[in-house]
Image: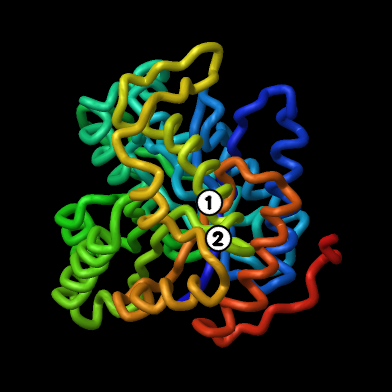
Amino acid sequence: MEFSIQLSAYYPDTQYGGKRLYQDMLEQAVLCDRLGYDAVSITEHHLINLLLMPAPLQFAVKIASVTEQIKIMTAVVVLPLHDMRVLAGEVVCADIFTDGRLMLGVGRGAFGFEMSRMGVPLDISREKFDESLDVLTALLTEEEVSWDGKYYQFEPLTIQPRPMTQPMPPLMMAVMAPEAIYHCTKRGLHILTTPLAGDHEQMLRQAEAFKSGKNELGDAGSDLTLSLSRVAFVAKDDADRRTKTQIANDYYSRFDNVFTGPGIVERGMVKPLPRKQTVQQLAENLMICTPSEMIDKLGPYTEGGIDRFILNVNFGVNQLETLETIQCFAEEIMPHFSNKTAATPAFNLV
């Protein structure tokens, strides 16, 4: 099993400043690169202070400029918000500018507030996503592509330059429902998923759906991978675990608002709302624990067939502690699941 850090910028205090926010993400990426993580991932979101990254491909190029070998995954680019004729060229450039380290994760969008304000409400985003994905794939793999659909109509054109990575950068589909995971896997797509704050059984259902789809493909699906993201943090002791879990609960009080709630946002700030899930229930489902407990908790993920575990460590903890958990995870936990050995960190954490 490989490991990735999700650079999901969380911005609860706008006084912190956008430059400092993204500098933190870059500092995390550099440390991950030195410590042997397989990838870092970037989540596209607009107009809100949660998971804030309105320019994922630009940020991927910036990360590549300060790192040496780590893969850079978009998790995800929200296709319905883009014109595929423009995005295809941007993807090709990002693939070139990252020296082939780009992994293109795509999705339909998840937050109603964001999608409606951007002119693509969720009730049409699935339909537009499906057509957009077909258009993007055609543009990246074929020449002289024409289209006559509901959302795209254009005469023959060829995206230039052509993709450096042939036939195109690795394409990953973001999907959560087990049935949808199964069908997307059968289409020959790599899968990005998450149980969010769900329980262990949800993860197993997602993994089993991927396995079923991959098995039906036979040899054609042998290279497909399943990447799974969830909030994870290395705690020093029980008191630290409780503190971090409470911070995570505050994060989810905003996340739930825009994901399944009313979407109350004021001046770009997502309002925290009371949660149905208790803090204790959240603690049982998240991966906030000591190193030895983390090793035990990750065992079923390996057994379930997860190829890449993506740690979301950016849920409100300060930067120093976040860097410490990235380093601790690489040195004390990763060696139990990966053949890679943690390298000397970029700097000493004090």
Q: Quadrant of residue 269?
A: top right
Q: Quadrant of residue 17?
A: top right
Left or right of 159, for residue 331: right
* Mark 1–mark 2 CB contact (< 8 Å): yes
Q: Note whether residue 92 is visible.
A: no
Please tell me which residue is depicted at 57% across the width and 77% down the height of the picture.
334
Q: Secondary structure at mark 2?
A: helix
Q: Which mark is residue 238?
A: 2
**Residue in front for this viewpoint, 214 or 298:** 298
Quarter in which the N terminus is drawn: bottom left
Q: Which residue is mark 1?
A: 242
Structure colour scheme: rainbow
Please tell me which residue is depicted at 56% across the width and 32% down the height of the picture.
54
**Residue in front for this viewpoint, 292 or 149:** 292
The three-letter code of the residue at mark 1 reads Arg
Dot 1 alpha-carbon crowd within 10 angstroms: few under 14, some 14 to 19, many 20 or more: some
Picture coordinates of residue 19, whole percent (x, y):
76, 33
Picture coordinates of residue 349, whole percent (x, y):
82, 62
